[in-house]
Image: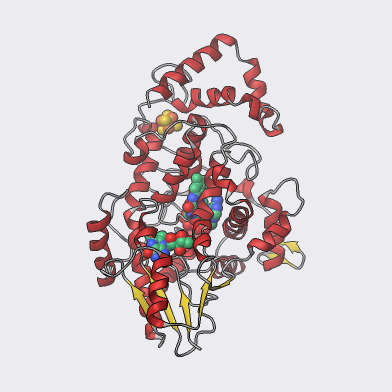
Amino acid sequence: MSTLRIVLGDQLTRSLSSLRDYEPGDTVLMMEVLEEASYVRHHKQKLTLVFSAMRHFAEDLRRDGMSVDYVTLDDPANTGSFTTELERAAARLAPSRIVVTEPGEYRVRQMMDTWGAEIRNDDRFFATPASFAAWAGARKQLRMEFFYRDMRRLSGLLMDGDEPEGGQWNFDQDNRKALPKDVLPPKRQRFEPDAITRGVMTMVAERFGGHFGDLEPFGWAVTRTDALEALSHFITACLPNFGDYQDAMRQGNAFLFHSILSPYLNIGLLTPREICDAAEAAWRSGDAPLNAVEGFIRQILGWREYVRGLYWLKMPGYAETNALAAHRALPGFYWTGKTEMNCLAQSIGDTMRHAYAHHIQRLMVTGNFALLAGLDPKEVQQWYLLVYADAYEWVELPNTHGMALFADGGIMASKPYAASGAYINRMSNYCAGCAYRPDVKLGPKACPFNYLYWDFLMRNEQALKTNPRMAMPYRTLAKMDEAKKTEITAEARAFLDNL
Ligand code: FAD
Ligand code: DLZ
Ligand code: SF4
């Protein structure tokens, strides 16, 4: 009996469930297909990362004696989709069965269900869609914090028996510092492209030159060996400061103390378990403080698992949510970074240069603007899905519809993450280089986030006023005189109509 084992571009893990019981005579099928490369116009670095990592992974499997049937994108016989390529491979190889690991995206799951394959769980995650659904059960609210505590107990990470290490589950109150001028984040590693990567870069430049973002310089790791080196560099050089400056932003430094590991994690070059274990070990050996290590582990064990659970629980309806009835088109500057609002110009510029921006840039700059301006969730979601090297719908969609836009009506976040210019000014040095001033509320010099914030609250009063966590801003709004409200509305209108 010969088995055809499929490995998708975000399944590049040797312990993958579909590879586990490989036997001589079996074949591993890997397919570069146009449909995946173009269902959104992915950043050129994301395309290069995925194709190069796939090609390197295939080499590794072959080196270990496995038989790999690899279809390249420029193969003239390539039919362009997973389903038709699988049909072609099945005709070629006549396997007696097909084995595959469940995919990350609903869209691909629908295709996969037609393949007549044995679909195995993706056990690289701590939770399964089924265990998350069981946790969600009849709960009225699906708050991440409670899910995270269960995951701590289940995984044993940062536990002292049944109690959390340090006596607290969450050290977030220590993790909101602005970055002092004299704290210099370390220089980050770049991995020089080898011949395989350079070949992919040429293909991407030729075939996808019109896609978003800069192709060069390309410095992502495309092998497990290099991804492990990136992990080790993060643990020693960045993790000790990760907690303190997790929410900080600085012009000219996209990475600060963040791990930049999500692209590797999401395609399988690293596993969540090994990253969390490495972080915990750094705390146990006294090399990183608990607030940093707990904060970091919470992102992976808590948020990452939680958004995946939510995605599978709520799809396909989740992609259609638009609780605040937001319908404004995405402004052109999201594609060019050309705007006088310096925080947006910098965050979008980082995104174009690196296919990366850190969480607070995504949430509190580009996301906050999209929320306050009432941008259409579908357009915003497409943008986030294509601009980042780590973007896959299962993780991107809940973060966009749920966390950034409140489009899901509060399933994920207990209140909208809406903020005025004061927040961005406190957490960054962007405002010093801006045409606007964060302390000015109205008039030509006013930071647009200021009047957009109040206009957002007024526009969405019906939907948000009864939310207890919004009580304070609505009390302030109630005290505002009518003339000022009218002025705010007029300036917000003029600004938005001009976008
Ligand atoms: P670090 O700050 O070093 O965090 C460590 C790890 O924790 C990350 O690598 C990631 O795996 C995980 N993590 C942190 N926050 C989250 C979160 N909110 N949800 C899920 N995992 C998290 N993350 C993606 O992996 N892919 C996406 O497409 C994506 N889209 C996002 C869109 C929006 C609007 C927002 C607000 C957030 C999005 N995130 C996404 C979450 C988060 O911003 C990124 O995971 C993080 O910026 C990746 O950089 P890092 O590896 O340096 O993260
Ligand atoms: C992102 C991506 C791209 C650009 N191309 C491919 C591809 O050609 N072949 C492949 O197997 N996977 C690719 N991927 C990753 C898939 O889009 C990903 O596996 C699905 O979205 C399921 O999560
Ligand atoms: Fe952004 Fe406003 Fe600061 Fe300018 S003043 S950088 S628009 S927050």
Up the image or down, 255 lies above or below 470; here it is: below
Ligand 2 shown in quarter:
bottom left
Q: Is residue 382 above or below residue 234?
A: above
Residue beneath the point at 42% across and 68% down: 227
In the image, what residue occupies the spot 61% across and 60% down?
Answer: 301
Query: How many numbered discs?
Result: 0
Residue found 33% across the figure and 38% down from its top:
337
Q: Position of residue 93 (x, y in %)?
A: 40, 82
Q: How is the image coloured?
A: secondary structure
Q: Nearer the viewer, residue 172 or 270?
A: 270
In the figure, residue 229 lies in which quadrant? bottom left
Please report the residue visible at 51 percent of the width from the left and 17 percent of the height from the top. Answer: 489
Question: For the C terminus, which image quadrant?
Answer: top left
Q: Position of residue 184 (x, y in %)?
A: 41, 51
Residue at the farthest front position: 91
- Which residue is more in the foreground, 63 or 257? 63
Residue 392 showing in the rendered view: yes
- The image quadrant of residue 47 is bottom left
For this rendering, which residue is in front, 352 or 21?
Answer: 21
The image position of residue 92, as x and y in percent, is 37, 80
Question: Is residue 248 visible in this depiction of the protein?
Answer: no
Q: Is residue 256 above or below residue 159?
A: above
413 to the left or right of 230: right
108 or 347, nearer to the observer: 108
Q: Residue furthest top?
A: 483
Instruction: Give the quarter of the image for residue 195.
Output: bottom left
